[in-house]
Image (cartoon, rainbow, N blue to C red):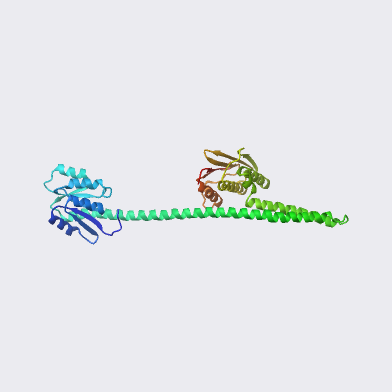
Amino acid sequence: MDTSLSQARILIVDDDAASLMALQELLQSPTQEVVPANSGEEALRCVLKQDFAVILLDARMPGVDGFETARLIRERERSRHTPIIFLTGAYEDVHSVFRGYEAGAVDYIVKPLVPEILKSKISVFVELYNKNAVLIREVAERTRIEEHLRKSEENLRALAAHLQSVREEEGTRIAREIHDELGQALTGLKMDLTWVANRLPGDQRALAERTQSMFGLIDGTIQSVRGIASRLRPEVLDQLGLTAAIEWHAGYFRKRSGIRCKLSLPSDTLMLDHERSTAAFRIFQELLTNVARHANATRIDVAMRVDSGALVLTVEDNGKGIAESSIHDPKSLGLLGMRERVLPFGGTIEIIGVRDEGTKVKVSIPLGLK
């Protein structure tokens, strides 16, 4: 429906020119545009081009009469719901009135017309038309706003995915530089220190003790460098795959937190693309971090499998159980980040918390194309 115009249109159909002119003069106003038609055929052409608030239709016309015109108007999608008021003579019988209602009329007005009654009835339909026009504009505006929000959300998600990808690439680059450059420098330093230690006189006990202390410091620094590089981007994920990376990180987590980890992992190597492997591994890291920070758990059960074309990762702890309010809290950035990681793949994350019994998180990532 075209609602861009401020005037509501009224279609008047009558084969009598005098009646047509009188009705046009009666109903024309600054807020109403009256469109005359002197036949059923002309009326049909009008409803094909324009929308009308109401149609005044003479029942008896030569050629296509009012009843047939009303039926044809109702068959057109554009005018299917336009109110039709029949204009009829006092001589019309009950059967003709029924024909009019069957053809789609909403009312009958008997000639000669009473201007006040006609204007009152017309005003009701014009007001309904105007309110409907306002409603349509509001719906269109809301639809436009929702579409804008949807596109903005898509852009933000694309940006977030891009930033995650850039961060992973940067982490990989930094991890390699740390491993290669610092690792090689420390190894070289240790070799030089070994050369010095082997050439110390036997009576230089203080220097020998200091040398041993330096060996311990270098070894500790090498371990720290390896740990930093692994946290940035574990080599095992790229070299051996997701299963090995899950197993490695669970062992690392167990040593640091003291929380027991029971693993149920597939025996076969999972063939996953780089993006899905990274997403699953980072989610696993975040889940273990949340357990260590919030759960007060002593045990974690980890299971990973492929089920119905999807990678399914389940992490369950025996801690205090996450509250329902925390699951949907927009401030829970860790949970929000996990959901964003599975979204590009059409994945899901289900979180169930039972007070004083623990929390179960099920991550599902389809293995199909993005």
Please report the residue visible at 22 percent of the width from the left and 52 percent of the height from the top. 45
Residue 52 appears anywhere in the view: no
Q: Is residue 283 left or right of residue 146?
A: right
Q: How many numbered tags mark residues here?
A: 0
Nearer to the camera, 8 or 332: 8
Residue 199, relative to residue 238: is it above or below?
A: below
Residue lying at the far right of the rendered structure: 203
The answer to which image quadrant residue 134 occupies is bottom left
Q: Position of residue 188 (x, y in %)?
A: 75, 55
The answer to which image quadrant residue 71 occupies is top left
Nearer to the camera, 316 or 146: 146
Q: Is residue 299 left or right of residue 202?
A: left
Residue 93, relative to residue 176: is it above or below?
A: above
Residue 183 appears anywhere in the view: yes
Nearer to the camera, 368 or 113: 368
Q: Position of residue 354 (x, y in %)?
A: 55, 42
Q: Position of residue 353 (x, y in %)?
A: 55, 43
Q: Position of residue 141 (x, y in %)?
A: 37, 56
Q: Is residue 136 left or right of residue 239?
A: left
Please report the residue visible at 44 percent of the width from the left and 55 percent of the height from the top. 149
Nearer to the camera, 49 or 289: 49
Q: Is residue 131 left or right of residue 84?
A: right
Residue lying at the far bottom of the rendered structure: 30
Residue 91, relative to residue 138: is it above or below?
A: above
